[in-house]
Every structure is written in structure tokens, then in C-alpha cells.
Amino acid sequence: MGGGRTARGPLSACTTPEMSVVACSIHIDAPPEKVWELVMDPERLGEWVTIHRKLLDADEGPPRPGFQMVQSLHLRGVNVTVHWRLIDCRSCELAVWEGRGPARSRARTEYHIEREGDGTRFDYRNEFHPPLGAVGALASRALARGVPEREAKMTLARLRNLMERPVTAAGDNRTG
């Protein structure tokens, strides 16, 4: 595979008891440029991210390091607000978001995109650091029981379905 990637995901994971990591990949029958365009458009998060509830704010213009957005997510039965900052951005290749949530919780989400045959390989990785360190991590794992991985897989399946849907007469693949 090359580029420091592991068989499971885009980066070798170094986890601590204070965090949880979810990594998964999917092949999408669409060019990397189209996948990038969709996943980096904050206005379209609701079309593919299963836990997305509402975009509360987002910077104007194209994605770039320092780009910020505020998002409402539905986690374990509760809506939470997360403030995201794009810390690394390489067009059609890599996006790394760092997020801050309630009670000093933190997250890091990475999108790795690469051409794979006639389509795109999309690698997704999320690190979640719950509040209260190791104690919070234990409680989080006990409550979650595989939910983050299931949600990530459902999100990537929605992304693939959205990207592979036939193009409409208007020239795009949006619904509505």
C-alpha cells in the first residue's frame, strides 16, 4: 500500500486508555475529485454523516488549514455541539479535523482519499478523547459497545450510495 498506511486504516494507531479509535475504509465508484468535493462541503454533511444533526456555522470559501465549522452531532442519545478546525488539508488527498466538544472532550477525524482503479479509496479515522481521562474512557466504552464503529460503517455506506447514485438531468447527484 505504501505511504505509511496499514492494512486496517490510513495511519498506524497509537491508542491510550484515555481514547477510542475507529478506522474504516471503503471503495467508491467515483473520481477522487468528486468525493473530495462532497465530503469537504459542510452544507452537505447531513447527506452522508449519520450522526450529523445541524451545521451551526462554517467559514466561507474553500477548505484550507484553519477553516472552522460548528456542528451539532447526535451521540449516544444526546445532541452535542462540536467546534471543528481543519489542521491539515491537501486537496483530493487528506483532511485532518480537530474538534472540541462539551466538558473538554476532544476528537480528531481524518479523511484519506486516493485513486483506486477507476474510483476512490476513502479511509476514515476518528480518535475520541472523552472528558475525565481514563475514567471517562471506561465509561464511554461501557456505554458505546461498538456503536462508533457501526456508525462509521453506516456513514461510509451512505457516502458511497450518494456518490454512486445515477446523475440527474440537472447534472448532479443530489436528491430533491
Image: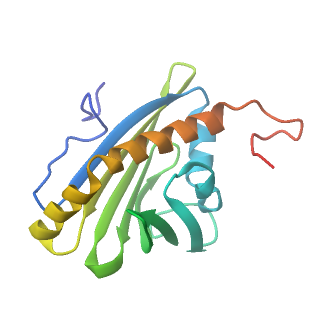
Residue drawn at (58%, 56%) of the image: 45
The x and y percentages for residue 163 are 64, 36
116, above or below 11, in the image: above
The x and y percentages for residue 68 are 49, 72
Residue drawn at (78%, 33%) of the image: 167
Answer with the quarter of the image where residue 46 lies: bottom right
Farthest-out residue, top: 117
56, above or below 115, in the image: below
- Front residue of 88 and 80: 80
Answer with the quarter of the image where residue 102 lies: bottom left
Q: Does residue 68 show up?
A: no
Residue drawn at (29%, 46%) of the image: 146
Structure colour scheme: rainbow
Answer with the quarter of the image where residue 12 lies: top left
96 relative position to 165: left or right: left
Which quadrant: the N terminus?
Answer: top left
